Structure formats: structure tokens, C-alpha cells
Image (spheres, coloured by chain):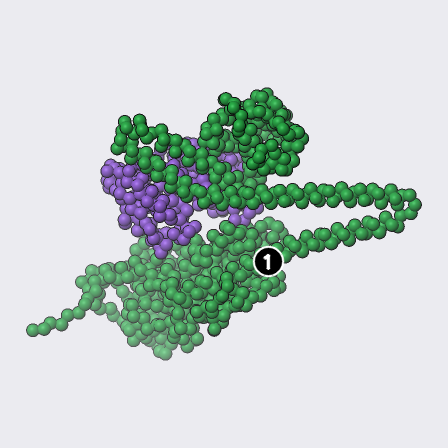
Chain colours: A green, B purple
Amino acid sequence: MDTTANIKFSPKILVRLGEELNQSPSQGIVELVKNSYDADAPDCTVELLGVSETGGTIRISDSGYGMGVDTIENYWLVLGNSPKTGVEITPLGRRVAGSKGLGRLSALRLGTLASLTSVEHTDLKSKHSITINWDELDKANAVEDVHLKITTTRNAKRLISGSQICIENLREPMSRHEVRGLARSLLLLSDPFNNTSGFRVKLVSPEYEELSQLVEQSYFSACEFHMSAVIDEDGRASAMAKDWRGDPLYTGGHDDFGETENPPYSCPPAKFDIWIFLLSGSSFSTRNVSVSEVRLWLQEFGGVHIYKNDLRVSPYGDRGNDWLGMNLLRAKNPELRPSTNTSIGKIVVLDANNDLRQKTDRSGFIENESFLEIQRFAENSLEWLAKRRIEEREKKRRTDRKESEDKTTKERKSVADAIDLIEGNVKTIVKTAFEKHERQQEKLIRNLKKEIQLYRTLSTVGITNAVFAHELSHPVKLISQSIRTIRFRAKKLLSVEYENNFAKPIDRMISALETIDVPSNVTLSLIRFDKRRVARIDIHNILNDIKELYSPFLSDRKTDLVLEFCSGNPYLRGSVAAFESIVTNLINNSLASFEGVNSKDRMIVVSTRVVDDILELLVKDNGPGITLIRLEEIWLPGETTRTNGTGLGMTIVKDAVEDLSGNVQAVAIGELGGAEIRITLPIIGT
Amino acid sequence: MNNLILHDKPIHNIAIVDDIEDARSSMSDIVHDAGFVPFPYTEIKEYSLDQFVSRIIQDSDAAVFDHNLSVGGYANFDGAEAVADLYDKGFPAILLTQVQGYDFVKIVSNRKKIPYLIDGSKVDANQINEGLERCVRELTLDFPPDRRPYRTIVRVESIDLSESHRRVIDLIIPAWATSKPVQLPYDYVYDMINVDLEIDMHLVAEVNIGAECSQDLFVENIEVAEEIDHELTEFIRS
């Protein structure tokens, strides 16, 4: 005898599907709101009643087409088999947005009771209701065993169609943070900045009101640049960037995008708008909004959002979501690149064929070809804009230089013409004086050009060093870890034999590695951003840090660095980099002077003394002193007594001391028998 | 085998998260020598931070993270964020960094939730043991003196907003050091107090004033201090 059987589903499957496939309660509520959009509702209201505690209620109401018994039974109650394919168009011309119904399930299960009341537009006289008691359903053996009743009653008001969903007796309270997140999601759902969909969502909560006011501020006109890029039906892109006044700056066609060849984008037509802000006081000095207002607004809504047809798809543009890698690119080029905190953007995709498909757990789009192509388009657009801005900056730099030269020539001619108008002996006197002045000026310019060349060379040296320092850090880390592992294992395995045969060479390797690390650390430490900013600098702290940084190097060179500090903590205003470059250059010179000299007990003493708000910094050593060069020449660039020396160290010391409004003097043979450099710097306090 | 235990559960498997293959092997050796079973991750770029943290908790009992994970595309997040997230979930994790790659904003902002930060080139088995022991202590609310937070007054020494990608403030924390400014990301402080910061403004914050160096300091739960009189201000400044 045969028996017919069915696969049955335990109610637990609903828990799994509803709760585990959705990221948050607000995501589920957004899915319910999308159902209202699909029902052609002009608006949808979400009310939160007593949700800060367990047992609260969420009510979602719309005035859409509503549902009859048939739709409730065959669509609303069916999970995972949505008739919506994403290509259907509603009578109002909207592309349907809802999907498998799992989001709906998640939202409905937030409470122990969920009820639906609906009036269909074709039958305003009837009202249909259904209630799901999840506690009862959860007790059942199988989902199919529970029968739900759809009740139809007379609709007394007979005014409008629509649906209302009530989720009662919430299992968990909603935190203020969650409510704010929901408010943000609902507010951004139908492009609040340029709503053409005719769909408005309202959340009845103070958080929503607050954010809604912030949205209405709409600071787009305070942007520095606005770029608009499009992909047409054939997958070809074009872009235009405008300045803050709305005047066009740059335009580009498809072939201007991408590195070399740019194949057509294989995705639906899309439009990418981004507004980029320069959040600095100077940029906002002529605007009628403040930087902090715009910053707050960008903090809340910044980033690049994606709108598929008319509705937003999260998480693109959510806080912390940087799907175009903008922040990393900005870190490399802060002047010319936007970040998620300095820009707001949206990509509107007209996806008639439903090429962009959302993941089941609603954590964004499936990364298929269409999505990756949209991403490539957005990245190429940002790249295009950055390149145009770099070109612009270079052009301006060259124009400024040329203009300045032309202006100088013109002014020189006007002075010469004026001199020609002078009569008698005075003319010769003035002319001679002017020519003398001109020669001096030219000399000054020649010197400045030489100095620029010097600093370009130094910059190149610095950049090269920094690159090598970064490259070196990985092998050094690996060698260091491996030697320490060998030491650990050998000690364990060999015991006494380790101490006798291996301890010394292994310790030597570790010590040598620490020395190898010093140049990298010093280089990278010098170029650190925070060291270049002007702030309070604590002299003794910096000297201690330098000593620690140099210690493996000093011990390798058998040199003792002695710090002799005055009482108190003298400090001044300047950059740590400037002060460090003074001290490190002087220490480097002392160390170099010891080379080839058979001196015992090599010593460098750095001492501080404060007299009347002036710090006296003395760096002296017991090397051979300053020899083979005239004392006044040590400050000149390129002057050195060493074969491999650059002759730049003392020039930098002098420049850096002067930048800190101080003075520097050198003594050829000082107190310790070697060179002695005396620096005075004005300080703020001790 | 190591006998370290957290909430009655022995610590056995240690997740190793580093973007460089050789570094993962090297760290596996060190973790093995420390008496644990190394569990290196070769491919993690498909995970979000949340997903990866859940995976780690499922696979292992503790973790060692290198900080720079996202630069070469190995991960979509950095080590400091992952360690902080794990700390919130009561899971022990050590963070390795290097002078060369010190990520000021992310590390400083998450410092409270990074119980053990160490230079990757100086780590050995003893330090892994010490680090994990410290993590376990802290997760069972037994804070070592250098990690114990105290409510204390701090003063804004200077503000630098000149570079929009790196807006910083210097704070003086008299209970820690009277003259050494401590640098924090401006937005980190601003986000907590929601008030524009000004030089000489006084704040109240939770700080581990027993920390030996500024890199070990955390400054948390910052609030604007109530107005204090001029003499007291001068006293604090002195």
C-alpha cells in the first residue's frame, strides 16, 4: 500500500529565514515600505509606539492599491516565491522593488502578533484582515498545520484603498541608535534630494524629524565641485564637472575614461552625481553656511549611494561603507580626491531588465558583471575628475610663474622708462643705483634657485629613503621574528650547549638587526605628518625620543650620547620635524667625525639651559673638531670635508634654527675637544 | 601545551591574520612555540568585518592580528578594527604594528579595546604568552595598573584643522604628564562631545594614567567639564 507524504516545514524555519537572513529590524521594515511603493502608494507612514521597551508596536500604513483576499492568500502569505521579477511596471509606471518576501517575514516576526488590514482599490466596500499569532504558530508541529483566517467586513468609510500592517508586542526594544538608523534608511530610500518617484515615506519619531530637517538643509550649493557622469544605452560614458557657481570646468567623453582602452560598460544606463566639498575655513569664508554645518550634514549623509530605479539600496553610502575605496585614494592624494566625509554622491541606475540583483540577506547587490561594471564606471569617473584637477593645478602653477616673469619684465621696463624722463646728473645716479639693485636682485634669485634645487635634491633623497624604509620593514620583521624563534627553540633544545655555542652569535644578529632598523625608523619618523605640524614642542621629550631611536646605532658605534637637562620642561612653538632635523643632523655629523679617528670613549653631550626665555642648546663631542674647512663655510650647501658627505646637514641646521627664530654658532674646538654647536631658541615656557 | 583559560574554556587555537604569507608562517612558528595551535588565514577578502569576526570566534580561541591588512587587498578592514570588535565580544586578541606603519587614527581611536599592542619585529613566544595573559586578565575585568581607567581632567592644548584628512588636537592630561601633549584625532573627540573644541577647554575623560608611554594611552568617554575657575585653570596648567 502506498502512502502519500508531503515535506513539511517546522516553524523554526521561519525563524531562520526571517531573522537570520536579515541584517537588522530596520532592514525588514524597509522591505515592508518597499511593498507600499510597489502598490503605487504616494506615501507611507511608519509609526513607532512605545518601542523603547519590550511590547511596543510598529504600524505601517499606505494608501496604495491595497489587496483583496486572493492577493493576500497567494502573494502576501507566500514566502520565497514572489511573483515580482523586477521587470514589471506598476500602473503608475514604477518598477517593482520588493522581492522574495523574506524581509517582510523578518519584520512581521519582530512582535508576537502581526496583522494586516487592506482595502483593494477595485472594491472599496470591503475590508480584509488577517492576524498571525507567532506564539501559536511556533508551537505547531509544521507551518502547514496552522490555519489563518482572512476576515472580510464592510468598509464603512469607503474612501480610499490601502493597507495597514501592525506588528504588536515587540519581542525586543528598539534602541535610539536603531531608531535613528531606521529614520536614516527611510529618509534616504526615495532620494530625498531630488525626489522624482512621487513616493514619500514618513517615520513618526523625533529622530526622523531631526534628520529630516538636516536633509532639507541641502548644502549642495556650498560644494566646490559637482561632477555628473552618465552611461548611455550603448554603455558609453561621458562626464561634466562644474565649479561651485555652476560654471562648467571640464567635459569628457568615453575614451577619456580609464587607463588606455576603455571597453563600453556592460551594465544598465546610469547617472553618477557627486558633490565635493573643501571643508576648510578659507573655502567657506565667502559662503553663507558654516563649515561645521556642512560637516555635520556630510557626516550623516556623505558617501556614494546607489538608487536602483527610484529606491536606494543599502549598504552603499552607509556610514563606514566605502565601496569605491575613496578614503584610501584620498589618503594618498588629499588635495585632489574626495572622501566619504567630504562628498555626497548618488548613482541612479535605470535597471529595466533587473540586471542588478540584491543578495537574499539584503547586504547589497550580488557582485555580478553589471554591478562590477557600475563600480568600474564610478571609479573611472572619480579618476577622470582627479586627473583633470591635477592638470588644472599644474597649468595654474605654470601660468602663475609665467605671469610673474612677464609682470617683472613689464615693471622693470616702466622703471627704466621713468628713469629716462629724469634730467641731468640725477639720471645717471639713479640709473647706476637701479642697475646695482638689479644685479643684487638677480644674485638673490640665482641663490634662491640654487636653494630650491638643493631642497628638490633633498626631497628626492627623502622620498627614496622612505620608499626603501617601507620596503625594508617586511624582511627586517621576518628575519627578526625568525631569529627570535631560533633563539627560543635552541635554548629549549640545547640548554647549556646553547649558552656556550649559540647565544652570542644569535644575540649579535638581533643587535645588528636593531641597528639595521634605525635608518628606516629615523627616516619614517622624520616624515611623519604629525611631526611637521606646528604645535607645542617639548624639548626634553624630543631629545629623549631621539636618544632612544638612535640607541642601537650609537651602541654599534661605541658612542655614548649624554643628555644634560636643565630643570623644568622648556617648550616652544614649532614643528617637531624642524627641531629633530637640527639635533639629528648634529648627531650625524658628530658620528661621522669619529670615523677614522682612533678615539676611545666617544662621547656626544647634548645639554640645555634656559636664560630669560631663551633656550641654549649645546651639542658637543670629543671628536677631532671642525678642521679642513673654514668655520663660516660649514653652513654653505655642498661644502663638506668627507668624500661621501652631501654637505647639506649644516645648511639644514641653520635654516631650521632660523625658522624657529633662533641663532646658531659653531666652535671648531670646544669644551670636550671636538666640535661644539651652540643654538639659542626663544621658548614659551618651562 | 599552554594552560591559559578564559571563562573555563582552555585557549588552544590561535587565529593568525597577516597579509603576508611568510609573516603568517613566521608567526605560526612563534605561536606554536608559545604552546598553542596556530590557525593562519590565507584568504579573507570576501568577508566583511562582522563576518570575519564571527568566523574567528567560531574557529579559534584567541587571535594575533597584524594591523595593515587592507593596503594590499588581503582584507576589507584593518587589524585594529578587528581586535576592537573582538574585545567587545569578549574574545582575546593581540595587535601587531610597526613604527613604519603606525596608523594613528585607527589605533588611537580603538586603543581602549586593544589590550596588547606590540612591535611586530620584536615579538617572540614569551610575548605572545604575556600578551594573551593580559588579554585574558582584562576580559575577566582584572585590569593591570597600566590599563586601569581613571576619570580625570584634561585640557585642550592645541587644535590643528589645517589638513582636512588629518585633523588633530593635542591634549594635556595632568594626571599622566603635566607637559607632554597627547595627540588625538579631532573627530574622535568631537564625535563624543558634539561641541566645537577650543584651545584651553577642559574635558573630563577616562584615561589609563598608569600607561608608560603615549602610544599605550587611551582617552575614552570624553565629556565637556563643568566650568572651573581661573585659579584652578592656572594651577592645572602649572
Left of A307 or right of it: where is A251? right
Residue located 62% across and 61% down the image:
A245
- Of residues A289 and A655, the one nearer the viewer is A655
- Look at the picture and state if A252 lies above or below A418: below
Q: Position of residue A214 (x, y in %)?
A: 51, 57
- Look at the picture and state if A395 lies above or below A486: below
Seen as rendered, the residue at the extreme bottom is A122
Q: Position of residue A30 (x, y in %)?
A: 38, 63
Q: Position of residue A513 (x, y in %)?
A: 41, 35
Residue located 39% across and 31% down the image:
A508
Seen as rendered, the residue at the extreme left is A1
Which chain letter goes with mark 1?
A
Identify the image quadrant of residue A155. bottom left
- Look at the picture and state if B134 lies above or below A91: above
Residue located 51% across and 51% down the image:
A332
Seen as rendered, the residue at the extreme right is A424
Left of A157 or right of it: where is A260? right
- Of residues A554 and A377, the one nearer the viewer is A554
Few, some or many residues within 10 Å of mark 1 (<14, 14–19, 20+): few
Q: Is residue A634 visible?
A: yes
Q: Is residue B102 visible?
A: no
Quarter occupied by the C terminus of chain A = top right
Identify the image quadrant of residue A36. bottom left
Write down the residue under mark 1: A391
Three-letter code, disc 1 = Glu
Quarter occupied by the N terminus of chain A = bottom left
Residue located 68% across and 53% down the image:
A400
Q: Position of residue B63 (x, y in %)?
A: 32, 44
- Of residues A130 and A138, the one nearer the viewer is A138
Left of A408 or right of it: where is A372? left
- Circle 1 sits in a helix, a strand or a loop, which is it? helix
